[in-house]
Image: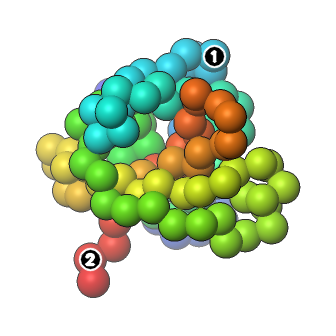
Amino acid sequence: MIKIPKGTSKEEVYERRTMIIENLQHLIGTAIRCKALKNQLVHFDFYSIDETATHASKRYESTLAALKVTKAISNAKFVGISETHSKRQIKRGFTEMIELSAELNGIGIVKIVVGNKKNQQLLHYCITKKIAE
């Protein structure tokens, strides 16, 4: 079993980021179907894993969610669609952002944001633990 640092220090966040990348890099070049998106493929590429590692490493619970990303995507439920809102999303060619959520045992509800690129069948994702409101 992997020991994941639970703290908030800079070193622990970087350690979690590295852990996410190391545990998900084998998925690069693969894709899984998402029932919430009418069985559309969600593609695993370097950018999706890097984006997830950057965001999910900030919190222990999000790191746990990131390590179960395939289960989360395959069991996700549709939440809503929004337009791209950051320069980075626009620069990468995303036309819309789709929000999904999934329930993961031992973690709770996670948020999955999927970027849709015009004229492409592949979607790119980022996953984090949803913060209670």
**Which residue does the numbered mark 1 point to in the structure image?**
29
Residue 132, numbered circle: 2
Labels 1 and 2 touching (C-beta < 8 A): no
The tag earlier along the polypeptide, 1 or 2, is 1
Q: Residues within 10 Å of mark 1 (few under 14, many from 20)?
A: few
Please, what is the three-letter code of the amino acid marked with disc 2? Ala
Quarter of the rendering occupied by the C terminus: bottom left
Per the model, the C-alpha gap separating discs 1 and 2 is 33 Å
**Residue 120: percent from left, percent from top:** 65, 31
* Quadrant in the rendering for residue 49: top right
- Counting from the top left corner in percent of width and height, residue 31 is at 50, 20
Q: Tell me: residue 74, above or below residue 91.
A: above
Q: Is residue 81 visible?
A: yes
Q: Quadrant of residue 72?
A: top left
Asked if residue 83 is positioned above or below residue 38 in the image, the reply reads: below
Q: Position of residue 4 (x, y in %)?
A: 42, 45
Residue placed at 55% from the left, 57% from the top? 97
